[in-house]
Image: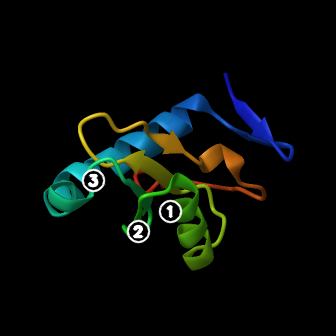
Amino acid sequence: MAKSTSNVLVSDDYLEQLSQIAELLYQRSLKAVLEPEHTNEYVAIHVDSGDYCVSPDYRAAKRTMLERHAVDGKLVIRRIGDEPEIDSLGYRCSGIDAKLPTQK
């Protein structure tokens, strides 16, 4: 089922791919750096750039990343640690003509 806001549809497949790419970035580059000191805080990851920020507050992490990057449907926020509570924000964006980095 597709998600819809502001007359924009993004497929569940897109959101799943976005989450998988963000999880790969987290596992390969961020986990070892973040988990020792930031477990149970939140990391917001901009999938295209690899940019990220950490905050104890979900909303603050999202707000910080949205100040750094245009709304483009490539933001994923997860809890740091073994139980991630991943939230793909691709569907919350308007004007999206998004392709994942793996798409051409």
Q: Which residue is drawn at 49% across and 56% down?
A: 57
The label on residue 26 is 3
Q: Looking at the picture, how far across and down is residue 46, in whole percent? A: 46, 63
Instruction: Tell me if label 2 and label 3 are in contact, CB under 8 Å.
Output: no
Disc 2, SS: strand
**Local crowd at mark 1 within 10 Å, few (<14), some, or many (≥20)?**
many
- The reply to whether residue 98 is visible in this rendering is yes
Q: Position of residue 39 (x, y in %)?
A: 26, 50
Q: Mark 1 belongs to which amino acid?
A: Ala
* Image: 84 above or below 56: above
- The residue where tag 1 is placed is 61
The residue lying toward the viewer, choosing from 30 and 38, is: 38
Q: Earlier in the sequence, mark 1 or mark 2?
A: 2
Instruction: Name the residue at the top extreme.
Output: 1
Closer to the eye: label 2 or 3: 2
Mark 2: give few (<14), some (14-19) or many (20+) Cα within 10 Å. some
Residue designated by label 2: 53
Q: Which of 39 and 66 is in front in this view?
A: 39
